[in-house]
Image (cartoon, rainbow, N blue to C red):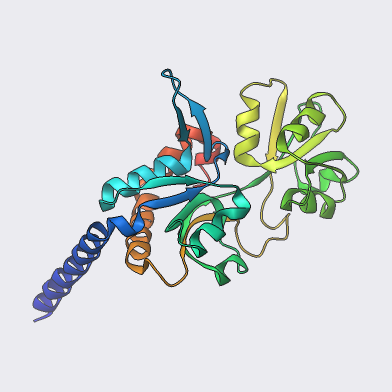
């Protein structure tokens, strides 16, 4: 009897998954507009191929391609500034957003979010002759960060002497020319910058050092109250990708082993 119940339960689960997959495929036209802001490498940025054609590449684009293949939906990319992404969902110009977006409580009032697919980490990039082994070592250091970001706020809380600038490019330039001793940024950005600048390294902060109650993670956003079947199907796949190493593989491709180890 127990074996029969177990068998019936397994069959029901398979039918439920199949029905979800079928529903996603049959409603592909409703889920084919994906908004992103292609100025956040290595997650998404525009490049020009050998034929002179522009295309968007990065971690998020590889994940989107994998999801669409496994779930059987087609999509078209819609570009906008990061601040306009949620507006694209609310106005119906997009059905989902994938753009390195953190599922904050405030944003969750306007959109629905998938399970997280990336663990973001804050790092401080510095010359090798500057020793940083903990958050306490930032006290009194001249540190650059982008204006009005979590990185600037975190550096201030760690008692650094903070210089805020408009872009990540300007932050890096201040570090290269010696105007500051270190720069606060996302770990993925720090890893990318190290490829072209020798003599530098970075330290990754723990959540405790930054006084974060929850990890900073990225999720896919959906129009509020819609696309529930697609959202459920994507959540199933994200769970699978975490377990089978797919997310680590994509992270390693775009960001290297050090970043992939956190996924």
In this rendering, the answer to whether 126 lies above or below 161 is: above
- Disc tally is 0
- Left or right placement of residue 119 versus residue 136 in this view: left
Quarter the N terminus occupies: bottom left
Q: Does residue 111 appear left or right of residue 188 in this picture?
A: left
- Residue 225 lies, in percent from the top left, at 43, 72
Location of residue 104 in the rendering, given as x and y in whole percent from the top left corner:
60, 64
Determine the residue positioned at 50% across, 63% down.
91
| Quarter residue 144 falls in | top right
Residue under the point 75% across and 31% down: 172
The reply, left or right, for residue 78 in relation to residue 110 is left
**Side (left or right) of 200 relative to 67:** right
Q: Position of residue 165 (x, y in %)?
A: 81, 40
Residue with the most extreme top position = 50
Q: Quadrant of residue 239?
A: bottom left
Residue 75, visible in the rendered structure: yes
Query: Where does the image place residue 69, in percent across and percent down from the top left?
Result: 28, 45
Q: Is residue 118 above or below residue 19?
A: above
């Amino acid at each position: 009897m127990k074996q029969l119940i177990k068998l019936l339960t397994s069959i029901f689960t398979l039918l439920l998954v199949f029905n979800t997959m079928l529903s996603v495929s049959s409603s592909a036209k409703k889920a084919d507009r994906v908004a992103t802001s292609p100025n956040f490498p290595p997650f998404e940025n525009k490049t020009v191929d050998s034929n002179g054609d522009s295309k968007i590449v990065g971690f998020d684009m590889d994940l989107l391609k994998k999801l669409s293949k496994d779930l059987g939906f087609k999509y078209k990319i819609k570009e906008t500034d990061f601040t306009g992404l949620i507006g694209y969902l609310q106005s119906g110009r997009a059905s989902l957003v994938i753009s390195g977006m953190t599922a904050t409580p405030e944003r969750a009032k306007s959109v629905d979010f998938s399970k997280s697919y990336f663990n973001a980490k804050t790092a401080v990039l510095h010359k090798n002759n500057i020793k940083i082994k903990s958050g306490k070592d930032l006290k009194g250091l001249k540190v650059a960060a982008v204006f009005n970001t979590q990185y600037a706020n975190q550096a201030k809380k760690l008692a650094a002497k903070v210089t805020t600038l408009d872009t990540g490019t300007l932050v890096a330039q201040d570090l290269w020319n010696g105007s500051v001793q270190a720069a606060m940024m996302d770990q993925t950005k720090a890893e990318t910058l190290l490829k072209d600048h020798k003599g530098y390294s970075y330290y990754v902060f723990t959540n405790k050092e930054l006084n974060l109650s929850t990890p900073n993670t990225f999720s896919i956003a959906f129009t509020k109250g819609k696309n529930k079947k697609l959202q459920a199907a994507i959540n199933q796949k994200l769970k699978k990708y975490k377990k089978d190493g797919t997310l680590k593989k994509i992270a390693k491709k775009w960001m290297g082993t050090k970043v992939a180890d956190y996924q």
